[in-house]
């Protein structure tokens, strides 16, 4: 059968196979979004009570509770996971040069993992400060 | 056997962006991405703030004073608006994901709901903050 002359680039590369992770990306983006609805609202509500204070002791007090510390860590994981997925979509849509694309896609993953690690470490430090 | 040069065809292209009449739904759509990126940039401040609270009292005072100042306040108001917008429009996307609200008038109505609720929630939040600070 003769292929249509108006074949799209997509159809031309079909034979190369896909990364086969599209569904996982879609699901995790929605899953983290659903998780972030209550988590981010709780975080903003907490900030209203805590962040207006010029004294970091109030943040230590807030995070000295296991519940608050755990919830904030879970929120940070969801935030940076969601950010990684969203930024990845934007990079894939707008950056066409293959070299730049690969570089920014890798940087996106590194930066978001680093941000998650840094912020979680700070939460743990604040959580354990009052216990010592 | 003669090699025939492959014929070239001009693929049909969609109308370019600048000839579209701007509508609220397309504005809200692109703002979802814009606010998403803005919120990611906002995490720089979040990390600096929480890291300083944990490890560096001097930096914490500097960051706190900046955020309590006029430029910090403008940034925070912008980020809170971006947050509520991305939250409201994200919920709108989740409804679409389960197949609800695709009709034109529904998409228009939900776009207005996103704009109005995000502005109202931002105004409400800052009323609480500024009222509590007094």
Image: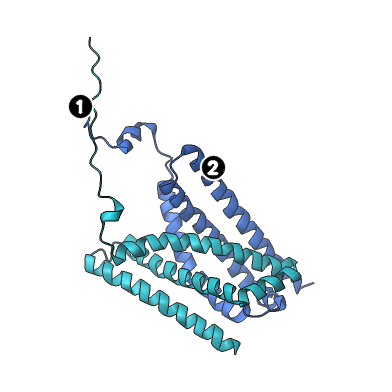
Chain colours: A blue, B cyan
What residue is drawn where x is 71% and y is 78%? A55
Instruction: Answer few, some or many: residues within 10 Å of disc 1's Cα (few below 14, many 20 plus, some between 14 and 19).
Output: few
Asked which secondary structure carries label 1, the reply is loop
Kindly indicate the quadrant of the structure image that contains residue A6. Answer: top left
Q: Residue B9 in the image: x percent, y percent?
A: 23, 32
Position of the N terminus of chain B by quadrant:
top left
Q: Is residue A65 visible?
A: no
Answer left or right for B27 relative to B62.
Answer: left
Instruction: Indicate whether A115 appears above or below A11.
Output: below
Instruction: Indicate whether B100 appears above or below A51.
Output: above
Q: Residue furthest bottom?
A: B134
Q: Chain of mark 1?
A: A
Asked which secondary structure carries label 2, the reply is helix
Q: Residue B115 in the image: x percent, y percent?
A: 37, 73
What residue is drawn where x is 51% and y is 74%? B77
What residue is drawn where x is 51% and y is 54%? A84
Q: Residue B11 in the image: x percent, y percent?
A: 24, 38
Answer left or right for B66 relative to A102.
Answer: right
Residues beneath discs 1 and 2 located on the same chain: yes
Q: Chain of mark 2?
A: A
Q: Nearer the viewer, residue A73 or B5?
A: B5
Instruction: Answer few, some or many: residues within 10 Å of disc 2's Cα (few below 14, many 20 plus, some between 14 and 19).
Output: few
Disc 1 and disc 2 in contact, CB within 8 angstroms: no
What residue is drawn where x is 65% and y is 77%? A62
Which label was assigned to residue A2?
Answer: 1
Q: Is residue B3 visible?
A: yes
Q: Residue B117 in the image: x percent, y percent?
A: 39, 76
Q: Nearer the viewer, residue A41 or A68?
A: A41
Position of the C terminus of chain B by quadrant:
bottom right
User: Dot 2 corresponds to which residue?
Assistant: A103
For marks 1 and 2 on the same chain, the one whose residue lies earlier in the sequence? 1
């Amino acid at each position: 059968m003769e292929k249509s002359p108006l074949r799209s680039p997509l159809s031309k590369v079909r034979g190369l196979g896909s990364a086969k992770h599209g569904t996982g990306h879609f699901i995790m983006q929605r899953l983290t979004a659903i998780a972030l609805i209550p988590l981010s609202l709780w975080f903003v509500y907490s900030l209203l009570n805590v962040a207006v204070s010029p004294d970091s002791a109030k943040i230590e007090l807030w995070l000295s509770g296991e519940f608050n510390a755990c919830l904030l860590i879970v929120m940070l994981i969801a935030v940076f996971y969601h950010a990684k997925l969203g930024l990845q979509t934007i990079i894939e849509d707008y950056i066409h040069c293959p070299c730049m694309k690969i570089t920014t896609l890798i940087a996106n993953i590194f930066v978001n993992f680093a941000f998650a690690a840094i912020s979680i470490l700070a939460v743990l430090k604040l959580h354990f400060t009052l216990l010592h | 056997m003669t090699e025939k040069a492959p014929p070239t065809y001009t693929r049909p292209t969609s109308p370019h962006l600048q000839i579209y009449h701007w509508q609220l739904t397309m504005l809200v759509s692109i703002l979802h991405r814009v606010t998403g990126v803005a919120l990611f940039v906002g995490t720089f401040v979040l990390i600096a703030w929480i890291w300083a609270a944990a490890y560096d009292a001097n930096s914490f005072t500097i960051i706190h004073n900046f955020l309590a100042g006029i430029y910090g306040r403008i940034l925070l108001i912008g980020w809170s608006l971006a947050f509520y917008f991305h939250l409201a429009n994200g919920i709108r996307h989740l409804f679409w994901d389960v197949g609800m609200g695709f009709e034109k008038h529904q998409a228009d109505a939900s776009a207005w709901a996103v704009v109005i609720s995000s502005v109202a929630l931002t105004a409400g939040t800052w009323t609480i903050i500024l009222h509590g600070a007094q």
